[in-house]
Image: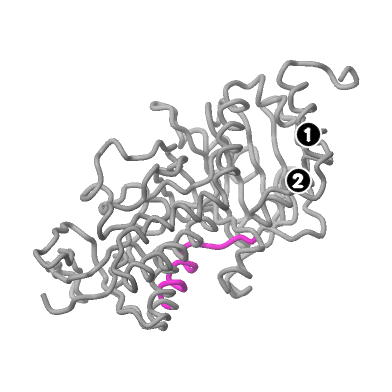
Amino acid sequence: MQTIYDAAVIGGGPCGATAAQKLAAAGHSVALVDPGDRIKPCGGAIPSRALRDFDIPDQLLVAKAHAARVIAPSGNTVDMHIGDVGFVGMVERESFDPFLRARAEAAGAHRIAGKLVAMEEAPDGTLRLTIDRMGDDGHGAKHTVGARLVIGADGANSTVRRLTFPARSKPPYVFAYHEIVESPSDANPLRFRGDRCDVVYDGRISPDFYGWVFPHGDRTSVGCGTAIKGHNLRRATSALRDRAGLTGQRTLRREGAPLPLKPMRRWDNGRNVLLAGDAAGTVAPSSGEGIYYAMLCGSLSAEAVAACLATGRASALKQSRHRFMRAHGRVFFILGIMQTVWYRSDRLRERFVSLCADPDIQRLTWESYLNKRLVRRDPLAHVRVFFKDLAQLVGIPAGQK
């Protein structure tokens, strides 16, 4: 074992790269382990706040969406314009993730191109990591490094979690599939617009989640997700492409991956391992949003690891989950209820889309999404939304509330 790092970060996506950058910038020795050979399936949407919070340069955005269109099973549509409160930035993970990894390396993290295959605790308490490392000649070789602490930011199918946590701790998930296609140059604006995200609530597309058409400049992400085994995601995506007028557009990539939709009850093992991002289940229910929360988890996990290194107290690792849930647990809880209630049937999905036409709901939705906190400055709006929501749920027609 040639090197013992203060921390080894497994996974170089937005979460792991952010954690590695922050720890390295603080003067800690950091290994960032990532194979760099895979692009995660992702709609690529991030709120404008993310650019400020994580110093994301504007040139990384391949598009800016200023509206969303929600589509009901009947085909009825509701346009939700953002207005002057911000925008939804669109990134392409093919370029976004490598930028974040390069930034971590520039801060001082040591990048190791490979995959974690084994991990064991040495008598002195350090962790020995066996990495299947791919050389420049294309041949793999086992490589061993040591670390005082490990951050598992290696996705929904986390190897770190599998090696150090009970199998029952795995969070529930939906499986997401999307296709990256060339954006049309002469699209019908009623079917496709380059500055609008389309969200489709239709049981034929997804019986328990939704489908999406998210423009990325000269490319577009089209996909859907579900937890129902046997639902044909490729066929559903083909139907989405047809609706948006993208059937004849060239397909550049096809990708699929699980999306965990509930944060785990515990993120650390009580000694020397901390999970973060998708590995800890921090993808928002109902929306499937993950990039902002992944980067926040990376930042919080770096702070927790730094505190553990400084004090020698493993209990410091708990602060990552505690701080995340204190800031966003209520939002995740509400989104989880929303998915459970409104995504159960096309009848309810139809009513849900009709609710989205309400100005109070649109304003509260965008302000909460873009600012990543529940809006508190207009309590009467929340009251109005509650009664409108209740009326739709029990089927009271408009005007009789």
Q: Residue at x 49, y 67 (%)?
A: 96
* Quadrant of the image occupied by residue 62: bottom right
Amino acid under disc 1: Val
For residue 111, above or below residue 218: below
Q: Left or right? Give the position of 17 relative to 147.
A: right
Q: Left or right? Give the position of 247 relative to 149.
A: right
Q: Is residue 281 magenta?
A: no
For residue 389, above or below residue 274: above
Q: Are marks 1 and 2 in contact (CB under 8 Å)?
A: yes
**Disc 1/disc 2 C-alpha distance (Å):** 9 Å
In this view of the protein, which residue sits in the foreground, 319 or 9? Answer: 319
Q: Residue at x 86, y 22 (%)?
A: 398
Q: Position of residue 165 (x, y in %)?
A: 25, 46
Which residue was labeled with disc 1?
A: 385
> Split into 4 quadrants, where in the image is the N terminus?
bottom left
Q: Secondary structure at mark 1?
A: helix
Q: Position of residue 273 (x, y in %)?
A: 28, 58
Amino acid under disc 2: Leu
**Main secondary structure along the magenta-highlighted residues:** helix
Q: Which segment is the magenta one? A: 89-102
Q: Left or right? Give the position of 21 relative to 81.
A: left
Which residue was labeled with disc 2?
A: 364
